[in-house]
Amino acid sequence: ADIGRFASQDPAVYDGRLFPNEDGPGLIADPQSLNSYTYCRDNPLGYVDVGGERPGYIFWKTVASTLNFHGYEVTGTLLNYAIASPFKITEHSKPKYTFGNSDIIGQSIRDSKGYQDILLDIATDIQDGGLEGKGSYNFSTYSEDTDLAFGLGKVSFTYTATENSDQEGVYTINITFSDTYDFDWNSYDNPIADAINNFGFANQYLKELVPYEIEGTITEETPVRKKQE
């Protein structure tokens, strides 16, 4: 059916070849369908914040890209995941972010100095007969781990260890790290880092940044010496 006198008399607006069998209620429910060029409705690459309601989206995307460009890939990756979707009025939660041995988060942890401290503590526990346990670690311990310090900070972990049946003294260790990604007020001693962090805290309150859970398991195979009697 035609959608009204104006549309039916103006071929620039209504063309039965382009919009066959359209009716009034359908077009009212989806007015963008009047124009075949409004593909941005379903095209995330074409998102435009016409009303300026979500300036934080562009700002934080730029910050995340800048961090990645300057080598802070953990910080940039985790920040990028926290940015609220521009296609939702408010986004209250996000799925858990997971990682493993070989992705950017897991590989950065394995390459860090702090990770060697964690492995040493676990090896000491294994020497004492502990094949499972838990602990926490703050990646701000070493300046070389700055990216992890900003991106993760203090993490909790659990581990299980199993001695290989064909290699005495060699253990397969599964370490599961967990953390909550969010911004706390005045978290840093550095005034510049603290200012950026506090701005993130404010944007978290405004729902421009969404807190989420992080969890990942790293598997290592390492020899552990028997404890000297």
Image (cartoon, rainbow, N blue to C red):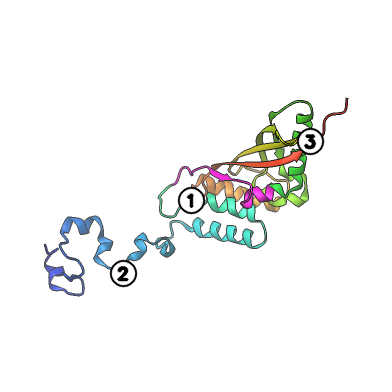
- The residue under the point 79% across, 35% down is 224
Between the C-alphas of marks 3 and 1, the distance is 45 Å
State the SS at label 3. loop
Query: Foreground mark, 3 or 2?
Result: 3
Circle 1 residue: 84
Specify which label sits upstream in the sequence, 3 or 1. 1
**76 or 105: nearer the viewer:** 105
State the SS at label 1. loop
Judge the density around disc 2: few (<14), some (14-19), many (≥20) Cα neighbours within 10 Å.
few
Q: Position of residue 122 (x, y in %)?
A: 74, 34
- For the C terminus, the quadrant is top right
Q: Position of residue 188 (x, y in %)?
A: 70, 45
Circle 3 residue: 224
From which residue to which does the magenta span run? 91-109
Q: Position of residue 52 (x, y in %)?
A: 43, 60
The answer to if 104 sits in the magenta stretch is yes
Query: Foreground mark, 1 or 2?
Result: 2
The answer to if 134 sits in the magenta stretch is no
Query: Foreground mark, 3 or 1?
Result: 3
- For the N terminus, the quadrant is bottom left
Q: Residue furthest front?
A: 166
Image height of 156 relative to 113, above or below: above
Identity, as a three-letter code, of the amino acid under mark 1: Ala
Circle 2 residue: 37
State the SS at label 2. loop
- The residue under the point 41% across, 65% down is 46
**156 or 27: nearer the viewer:** 156
Judge the density around disc 3: few (<14), some (14-19), many (≥20) Cα neighbours within 10 Å.
some
Say if residue 218 shows up in the picture: yes
